Amino acid sequence: MGIMDRIMGQFIEVIEWVDDSPDTMVYRFPVYSKEIKMGAQLTVRETQAAVFLNEGVVADVFAPGRYTLSTQNMPIMTTLRSWKYGFNSPFKADVFFVNTRQFTDLKWGTANPVMMRDKEFGMLRLRAFGIYSMRINDPKKFYTEIAGTRGLFTTEEISEQMRKAIISSFSDLLAESGIPALDLATRYDELSLAAREKLTAEFGTYGLELAKFYVENISLPEEVERMLDKRTQMGIVGDLRAFTQFQAATSMEEAALNPSGGGAAGAGVGLGAGLAMAQAMNQAYAAQPAAPAGVKCASCQAVIPEGSKFCPGCGKPSAQPSTAPCAKCGAAVPTGSKFCPGCGTAVASKCPACQADVAAGTKFCASCGQKI
């Protein structure tokens, strides 16, 4: 091999990059200490772009396709360097392949809780997390703003910057939304769409596009979740007294069947404790005062006891009719009634002259002869 063959062997004739990594965004073609032969073949595959730099200046950006490097398709090259040896001589240049595919399953999440004012719970601390995907839509801007001269640039090197931008914008969006905490789970799609629109300009400053954005979960503080669980349990229980009695009966049954409490003696102690607990609960419920009988006042809604002529709450006259006990069954019989509403017995009346008892249906008083 002659010296000319060795010299020509330093010239690069084929420029291409096949990427099999999931996170590489920019890759510099290895042309260090070598020169690119004029007329070399450049292959740019789909989801790629090739950024050419000559003497530190971006000379051109090639879209997917196959190119023969010559002054015909790189006219800007003739103005960026002096061609001492003619247009057919090799030249040195930096070639950066930019991966323009979509990078998916990137994580975001709030490191610190987001303070939010809720109408039902007051001040709350919320946490949120999700995933997003992005792509490079302006290779030249991404190279000049982010990648620079690094030979290899991955998503890990920019994901933290993007995560902070996402958290800042989403926290502001969540606080301004005014969505009740209990309704947030039904608004994930709306929040995702709004966040993506809000972050589009921020990603664009780096030559990036926010392709997808998803909110996976917005969680309440643990103490609030425990209180909500208790409220749900109370709603399921319904009748608290019946449920307490059932729990006491279940406890007695478990205590009687538990063999680890010292055999029959332990079972007896457990049974006695269960009975004592049930008796104490029943006494507590029995000790509660019964609601007074009567009707509600039309003005203040206080309960007016039977037979009262005035409301104990506001003092207004009661609309209840006056009553007297039935001589046979003791039921309250309104004044003027001819029969008892409890047993149907005819009610005796008084003579207006001598106040003697007059049987029902009598037309004259048997004592004084007064007409009834």
Image: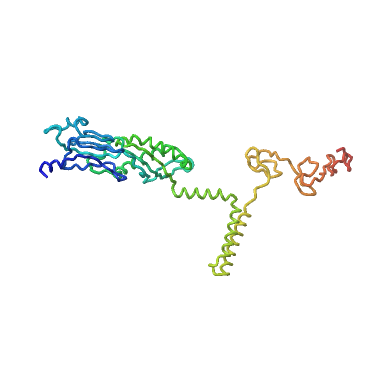
- Examine the image and state in which quarter residue 8 appears: top left
Q: In which quarter of the image is residue 196?
A: top left
Tell me where residue 350 sits by quadrant: top right
In percent of width and height, residue 283 lies at: 62, 57
Q: Quadrant of the N terminus?
A: top left
Q: In which quarter of the image is the C terminus?
A: top right
Nearer-the-camera pick, 332 or 267: 267
Residue 33 x, y percent position in the rendering: 16, 42
Q: Which of 5 and 306 is in front in this view?
A: 5
Q: On screen, 287 above or below 146? A: below
Residue found at x 10% / y 43%: 3
Could you say which is closer to the camera, residue 73 or residue 150? 73
Answer left or right for 48 relative to 244: left
Q: In this view, does 3 lie above or below 263?
A: above
Name the spot of residue 230 as percent of width and height, x first: 51, 50
Q: Looking at the image, what colour scheme do you see? A: rainbow
Q: In the figure, is residue 110 to the left or right of 80?
A: right
